[in-house]
Every structure is written in C-alpha cells, then in structure tokens.
Image (spheres, coloured by chain):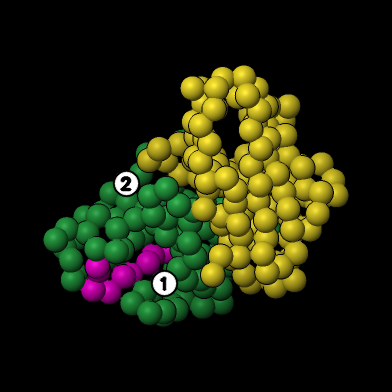
Amino acid sequence: GAVVSQHPSRVICKSGTSVKIECRSLDFQATTMFWYRQFPKQSLMLMATSNEGSKATYEQGVEKDKFLINHASLTLSTLTVTSAHPEDSSFYICSARDPMVWNQPQHFGDGTRLSIL
Amino acid sequence: GESVGLHLPTLSVQEGDNSIINCAYSNSASDYFIWYKQESGKGPQFIIDIRSNMDKRQGQRVTVLLNKTVKHLSLQIAATQPGDSAVYFCAERGYGQNFVFGPGTRLSVLP
C-alpha cells in the first residue's frame, strides 16, 4: 500500500487563489520530504527539500515566497502556492524516505494536478 | 544537477517482446540506484533498486544491470505487457541522501 499520501489529487481554482497541498508519510517519520514539479511529457524537477522543524531548502530559480513550505511534524509537509496564476498550473509531487533505513528508495505521493483558471 | 525540462525519449516494443531501457548517470560516487515507473496522472512507483557493489539484480519480470565503468544503468522487462506502458525514470543517490533523477523514457507497448 501507499506509504506517502498526497492531498488533494486535483485542484481547479481561480487566479489569485492560494492553494495548499499536503504530503504525509504513513508508515514512517520523515525528517526530510521533497517537492517536485512536473510539466507534461517532462521529467521531475526538484523544487525544494522540506526539513522538519527548520526552513526548507529551495532549488535555484524557485521562488520561496511563491511556494511556501511548512514541515511542522515528522509526518506532514505542506506546499502552499500563493496567489496562484495560470503559469503555476502543473503536476506537483511530493516524496519522502525513511531516514532510519539507509538503502531505501524515496516513496512518492500520487501527485496533485493544479489548474489555475 | 537535477533533471530540468527535458522532453522524453520513447521506446516502442511489441507485446510479448523484451524491453531494455537505458540510463546514463552522472556521478561516479553514486552508491545506490533505483528504477521508477510513472503511469499517467500518478506519482512514480518503485520498481527495483541496486547497490553499487552489485552489477545485476533480478525481480519479477525485471532485471537491473549496473555498469560502473561507463556509468550506465539499464532496466530489462521480460515479456512486455500493455500494463508496462508508462514513463520509466532512473535515479542515483550521490552526495548526501538526495536522489538525482534521469530524464525518463516513455515505453509504449504495441499490440
């Protein structure tokens, strides 16, 4: 079964709205989670690394004030797209891994399809 | 660095044939590798992994081969089925605990 749960799976909203996406680790405590963005027919693009209890680390070119990340607990990270505009429409995916197990893959959520009208 | 904005190459195979998907990785110090399958509208799913101290690992209908000399990883799928149609990504663990993803390959299974 799924070990990372992402919600919602799809959001359609008006321009200017802020949208919050949740990512939960179900079977383990994740001190680190990752947020990706994926455009159609393209690879995963890492946006930021979410760190429990501290600030997220953003990749170059990703606006931290546009994409707010909060990792308030060991099982939950949230990504808020603030004042979303049509160019923010995309597929957003989170992932996490169990830090207690060394050779273990990142597990991914099922993604959130964000459509801004 | 991370994969950014690359359009996916496509591999088309006949149903029942074997598929081989290739991946070149960048960091000779990477010690752990994973293959993921991503179906349309879903997140990537783990298929198989391999550590750098191995050169081959087999799963159910899938085999991963690792050639560290040329920094090459491949995924072999035996008796490809329509349900195997998806995008396949390789990932390498390099510095720290972060994974770097390849550009992905779209596998199309022809009837």
Residue marked by disc 1: B64
Protein chain holding label 2: B
Quadrant where the N terminus of chain B is found in the figure: top right
Residue A104 occupies quadrant? bottom right
Q: Earlier in the sequence, mark 2 or mark 1?
A: 2
* Residue lying farthest to the left in this orientation: B111
Q: Amino acid at mark 2?
A: Pro
- Residue drawn at x 53%, y 36% is A11
User: Where is residue B107 shown, x and y percent of the image?
Assistant: 29, 55
A116 to A20, vertically: above or below = above
Is residue B6 found left or right of A69 in the rendered image? left
Label 1 packing within 10 angstroms: few (<14), some (14-19), many (20+): many
Within 10 Å of the Cα at label 2, are there few (<14), some (14-19), or many (20+) other Cα atoms?
few
Compared with B63, A43 (above or below) is above
Q: Residue at x 38, y 65 (%)?
A: B74
Between residues A45 and A10, which one lies in front from this camera angle?
A10
Q: Colour of chain B?
A: green
Residue at image mark 2: B9
